[in-house]
């Protein structure tokens, strides 16, 4: 079966006043239909850039220097800006942003903002004018009811400040699903929520994936969220994919030293507050060998001289490490 999303050897750099910054350097992942893929890594590892590259919204000065991004059999890198706007963003790929407090405009009613998304990106059902608007309102009311937003009709007539953080995140999930996309990308959507609300949102997302038959690309830094929500996992370090596989196989037997170090930092497993010594290497000066070598406890001479190839662990995960080459 063809994956819904396949990223192959993606390279992205940004021209800055300080020189050329290599943000992504050989990122690869695959997301199957109806599954949830978690993308994990420290801040500065390239997770947000990966999302922006998929959606075609890289910042000014950024360029894709290599690789491919295939979505439902089409290479998104071959699309023009107009084609992405009219035929991909929101209509085929939905997006759930990180901060529900900032994502909604405080001066417009919720209904006005959600209907604007549908006005430009909803599939053409042949209706026009008031009939089309009525269909869109009915769709939103149905979605908000499914999101367990109280009094959906009144919610559309309310302003963002009249909702709690958890309710606003539910509104944004409804917006992401409004145009019936096949893929939804979520950028750490539970970070700004308390743990109780976070758990409710994660349960809701898993139910929606099964109910609507969508695929979900979920970016997070929390392995607890990954264990609760995701089917598959992609670990990114310094702009490179270092380990991919099923969540169960990686959590039970993490192969890459970076994956093991990240898991050791989780509160459920941590034995100290030391974390991982060192920092993510600068995008202006990457090490010549393995990018994780300066921080790795299992470093070997070969790690310092050459970039490690992809290998496979005993659990079946793909690993970028000389131990599995």
Image (cartoon, rainbow, N blue to C red):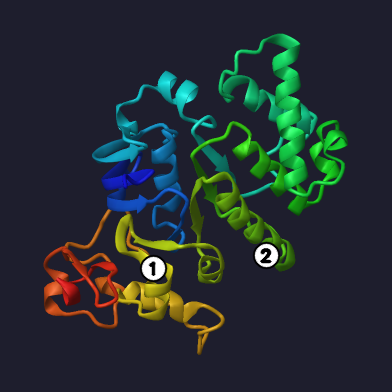
The residue mark sitting in front, 1 or 2, is 2
The answer to whether residue 199 is left or right of residue 277 is right
Q: Is mark 1 on a helix, strand or loop?
A: loop
Left or right of 189 in this view: 115: right
Q: Position of residue 232 (x, y in %)?
A: 41, 62
Q: Give the x, y percent position of residue 139.
A: 71, 31
Say which residue label 1 marks.
279
Q: Quadrant of residue 118?
A: top right
* Residue in the image at 29% along x and 69% along y: 317
Residue 253 — which label? none
The residue located at (66%, 55%) in the rendering is 204
Q: Is residue 179 above or below residue 203?
A: above
Q: Quadrant of the C terminus?
A: bottom left
Most foreground residue, 282 or 256: 256
- Does residue 35 appear in the picture of this structure? yes
- Give SS at disc 2: helix
Res 277 visible: no
**Residue 281 vs residue 123, the one in the foreground:** 123
Q: Residue furthest bottom?
A: 271
Q: Earlier in the sequence, mark 1 or mark 2?
A: 2
Residue 86: x and y in percent read 49, 21
Q: How many marks?
A: 2
* Relative to 307, residue 24 above or below: above
What residue would you read off at disc 2?
Answer: 199
The local crowd at label 2, few if under 14, some if 14 to 19, many if 20 or more residues have their Cα within 10 Å, is: some
For the point 36% across and 22% down, the residue is: 80
């Amino acid at each position: 079966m063809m994956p819904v999303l396949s990223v192959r050897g993606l390279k992205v750099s940004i021209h800055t006043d300080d020189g050329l910054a290599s943000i992504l350097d050989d990122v690869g992942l695959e997301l199957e239909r109806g599954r949830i893929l978690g993308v994990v890594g420290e801040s500065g590892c390239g997770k947000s850039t990966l999302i922006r590259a998929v959606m075609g919204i890289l910042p000014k000065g950024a360029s894709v220097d290599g690789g491919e991004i295939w979505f439902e059999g089409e290479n998104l890198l071959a699309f023009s800006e107009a084609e992405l706007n009219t035929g991909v963003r929101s209509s085929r790929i939905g997006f759930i942003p990180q901060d529900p407090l900032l994502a909604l405009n405080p001066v417009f009613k919720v209904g006005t903002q959600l209907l604007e998304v549908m006005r430009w990106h909803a599939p053409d059902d042949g209706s026009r004018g008031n009939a089309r608007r009525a269909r869109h309102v009915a769709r939103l009311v149905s979605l908000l009811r499914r999101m367990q937003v109280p009094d959906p009709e009144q919610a559309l007539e309310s302003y963002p400040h009249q909702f709690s953080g958890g309710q606003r995140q539910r509104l944004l999930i409804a917006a992401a699903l409004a145009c019936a996309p096949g893929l939804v990308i979520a950028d750490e959507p539970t970070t700004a929520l308390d743990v109780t609300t976070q758990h409710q949102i994660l349960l809701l997302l898993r139910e929606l994936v099964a109910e609507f038959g969508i695929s979900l690309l979920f970016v997070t830094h929390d392995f607890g969220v990954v264990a609760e929500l995701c089917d598959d996992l992609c670990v990114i370090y310094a702009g490179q994919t270092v380990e991919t596989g099923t969540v169960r196989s990686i959590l039970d037997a993490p192969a890459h030293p970076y994956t093991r170090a990240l898991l050791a930092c989780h509160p459920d497993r941590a034995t100290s507050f030391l974390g991982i010594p060192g920092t993510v290497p600068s995008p202006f000066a990457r090490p010549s060998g393995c990018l994780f070598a300066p921080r790795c406890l299992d470093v070997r001479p070969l790690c310092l001289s050459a970039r490690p190839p992809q290998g496979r662990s005993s659990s079946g995960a793909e690993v970028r490490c000389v131990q599995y080459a």
